[in-house]
Amino acid sequence: MLFRNEKAADMRSPEQMQASLTAWQNWIGDIAAQGNFVGTNRLYPEGKSLMANGAVIDGPYAETKEFIGGYLMVKCNSLEEAVEMAKGCPGLQYGGSVEVRSVMAMEMNEATKRFMAAQE
C-alpha cells in the first residue's frame, strides 16, 4: 500500500495530528495482530529523480499537490483482500488515498544471496 497525501494535510492542529497518529498506530496494530503485517515506513517529502539521460532532478515536485507519504507491506491471499484491509486506512479520513499493489517476487542469483546473507 502506498499512501498519498495532500500537502494541506500537514496544516492540521497538534491535537488533530496526535489523533491521526493514534488512528494509524491502531490500524497498523490491528493488521499486525491478525498476522498480516510485513513492514511500514514514512517517507521524507524531499527526494531526487534520476532520468534515463543521466540527469538528476529534485523531486517530488513543488507544483504537485499530492505526495507519497509512506508505505505498508502486508500479507494477503489476494489483491481484493488487501483492498478490503486498505479501506480502514486513517489517511482516507482527511482526503488521502491508498494505492494497493502486489509485490512481484524476484529470484536471486548466487551472488545476490551471498550479499544478502552477509548483511544479516
Image (cartoon, grey):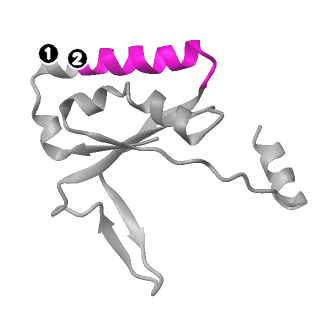
Q: Residue at x 30, y 20 (%)?
A: 21
Check residue 27 for magenta coloring. yes
Q: Is residue 19 left or right of residue 107?
A: left
Q: Where does label 2 land, which residue?
A: 18
Determine whether, in the image, residue 75 is placed left or right of residue 120: left
Evaluate if marks 1 and 2 touch, with contact meaning CB atoms under 8 Å apart. yes
Magenta highlight: main SS: helix
Few, some or many residues within 10 Å of mark 2 (<14, 14–19, 20+): few
Q: Could you say which quadrant of the image residue 55 lies in? A: bottom left
Q: Residue at x 19, y 45 (%)?
A: 6
Start-end of magenta stretch: 18-36
Which residue does the image show at 30% across and 67% down from the upper left? Answer: 58
Specify the quadrant of the image occupied by residue 90: top left
The image shows residue 9, relative to residue 23, as above or below, that is below
Q: Callout 1, which amino acid? A: Glu
The front one of 14 and 26 is 26
Helix, strand or loop for disc 1: helix
Of helix, strand and loop, which one carries label 2? helix
- Picture coordinates of residue 97 (x, y %)? 30, 42
Residue at 23 percent of width and 15 percent of height = 19
